[in-house]
Amino acid sequence: MYKKVLVIDDNPVDRYVAERVFKKYAFSEEVVCLGSAKEGLTYLLSLKDSPEQLPNFIFLDIMMPEMNGFEFLDAYETLPEIIKKSCVIMMLTTSMHEEDQVKANKNPYVSMYLNKPLNASAIKELEAFVQK
Amino acid sequence: MNTLLQLQIEQYLGDHIPENLSAFLEVISDSYDRYEKERSLFEASQQVAHIGSWELDIINNHLTWSDETYRILGYAPQSFPATPEFFFNCLDPDDVEAMRLKVELAINSGIPYDTEHRIILPDGTKKIIQSRSEVLIDRTTSKPYRMFGTIKDITSRKKADEQLVNANNELRTLFENMQEAFFSVDMQTMKQLQMSPACEKVYGYPMEAFQQNPNLWFDLIIDEDKQAIEAVTTDLHAGRSSILIYRTRDKNGDIRWLESKLTPTLKDGILMRIDGATSDITKRKEAEIALRDSEYRFRCIIQHSSDAMFILNKKGEIIFSSDSLFRITGYTPEEVIGNKDIQFIHPDYKNIVQNAWNELLKDTGKTETINYKRLKKDGSYIWCEGVMTNLMHEPAVQGTIVNFRDITERMDYLDALRATNEDLKKSNMELDRFVYSVSHDLRAPLSSMLGVLQLIQSDVTDPSILSDLDLLEGSIKKLDGFILDILDYSKNSRLDIKRDIIIFDTIVADVLSHLKYMGAGNANIDIKVNINEGFIFYSDKSRIYIILNNLISNAIRYSNPDATHPFVEINIQTSASGVIIAVKDNGIGISENNQSKIFDIFYRVSGNSIGSGLGLYIVKETVTKLHGNIKLISDPGEGSEFIIYIPNS
């Protein structure tokens, strides 16, 4: 079980489902859910001096108002190395847009592209991937 | 007394001449003197006439030649005694035999001869001689006893004759081969005096025809041109030569152009005869007419064309302009000739035109096409498409031909088209964003619902609640699938065809993993994949995905629940020209009745179908978009096979 995951999604239902699923299937001890990309960045930056508190995984939605998932990734690039070294980013989205998937796969910080909803089989897939 | 005579008498009678003879001798002597005189006169006349004479005493075989005879034969007069043999030696060897025969005939039978033969002079020159003889016959014995004759040098006359014959022959040849027919007409009797054989060539009728019908030449002239003949009559009567050009119709009904030169002969102011020559000028005339016509045609084309045409000299100055310039620019040719063409070009395009011009001058025969703006007389500019051809090397042109046309309307139209196209692209993109957003906005709550639903499913154990939840989950998935179908349909109909290398292994794997994730997978179904990608296949990746996704999901979805060994077989075979994709199953199959309808939009085979009724319609549309075709083989209860061919793009 991992210590901490961060979920960035503007949809409260999805945040709720994520929190429940991660806990239910004992993927992570702590699940931090944030409603916007900006909040996510602020949160990560606030932990730069205590890197042991940084999340192991960031589950990032794409379609979000104000700052979308890709804009978050651009900003993420400018974050201190210590933060980037600690976190693994997973895209978690309903987007069927081929370009989104291609774009996500090209981004060096994105490790995996997951389709919603998060459920038991998705956790299995995730664990299988992480173990590799 | 003649001294010679006296000497002979003295020889004959001794020194004394009897008295009675003396008077007689006086008379004879006088006669002899006269004879002597006449004889020398005779010799002189022979010399002048180049006629020599001879006498042969047949009885004594004694031959005498006159002085001129010696001269003709090439010897000094009386320098040796004449003999018949010597004469035969003087002859051309080819003529000796014939001459001997003639002489013998004369001596034996008294038949005189008059013949021509050749002699060879001591210096080797040849001469032609006319020989004549006369024979005296003894009345009592009836035998020839004396022969005399003449020889005459006729060499020069003979030569002149020959030359005359040759000249005549040449003249005749010339006359007969002349392309012109010569003729003379007696104007009093209107009789054809002469007509040369060339008339057959010129008029198409033989000489006889003109003799029979003296008016034939006039009859042949076509009616419209007969006036022309009458027009020159006055000239001819006034003694002035005339040249006439007119048309005749020959035996075949063909028109011939003829030219006649007529020379009148007047006597006391009255036209006596006309001499003339007529030649066939049809070819020349036809060439003239063809040239005139083609010139006229070209002139018409140039002047009436919607193009204007310039000829520019080396300096770029306009040296010719077609009248059509006025229609296009409002300038008359006179207003532009002498000016440089470049001054009529819009400042923004001077460079382009100048560069093209410089390129053009590098090679003769070269052509450059450019679009530019040209000044009109009213100060406005028009769009022109100009074609310049370097014809500096053509002596008739010695310049550059520039033709241009007003393409303002076309350019405006193109601009409008471009703008419309931009608009369309923009709205297409907007539509794409719209479809994308809508599909996301519709799908997001569905996936949220599904997430929550699956949480509940994992929490409860009551079978009746679970079965209700399954119904709910099925409905959500159906709705989601429907949205995805609409998305696919929209993608296919709007997006341009892309060209990627298709790797079927990857695509099929993606499809299968996606289907599994969507819960469409069925663990019992044996999925056999058989891909042969020996040839590289180019096509649109997302469309190939749509096709495979729909066919494979259908094959899984409509498997036969009663089959002991349900399978789906995917066969993909690429070739140089394209790919054959076959998806085969042993599922429920499709009745023949339904086979033609399954590709229709929103058609669903039964109420039990869980699809949207869009899947196969989208497949068909997509295959069509990729210029391929689709075939279905199916038997209810046995299974179905969809075979698709898509050409390489």
Image (spheres, coloured by chain):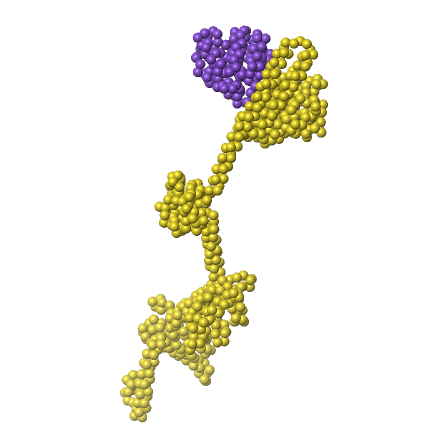
Chain colours: A purple, B yellow
- Seen from the viewer's position, the closer of residues A127 and B525 is A127
Above or below — where is B130 with respect to B648?
Answer: below
Residue B390 coordinates in the image, percent (x, y): 40, 45
Residue B178 coordinates in the image, percent (x, y): 46, 64
- Seen from the viewer's position, the closer of residues A97 and B627 is A97
- Considering every residue shown, the one lying at the far bottom of the view is B20
Residue visible at 41% across and 74% down in the picture:
B131
Residue B172 coordinates in the image, percent (x, y): 45, 67
In terms of image quadrants, where is residue A116? top right
Determine whether, in the image, residue B553 is placed left or right of residue B498: right
Determine whether, in the image, residue B533 is placed left or right of residue B1: right
- The number of discs equals 0
**Which quarter of the image is occupied by the C terminus of chain B?**
top right
**Which quarter of the image is occupied by the N terminus of chain B?**
bottom left
- Seen from the viewer's position, the closer of residues A93 and B580 is A93
Residue B515 coordinates in the image, percent (x, y): 61, 19
Above or below — where is B270 with respect to A43?
Answer: below
- Seen from the viewer's position, the closer of residues B382 and A112 is B382
Residue visible at 63% across and 19% down in the picture:
B477
Residue visible at 30% across and 91% down in the picture:
B22
Residue B312 visible in rendering: yes
Residue B196 visible in rendering: no
Above or below — where is B264 with respect to B420?
Answer: below
Residue visible at 42% across and 70% down in the picture:
B240
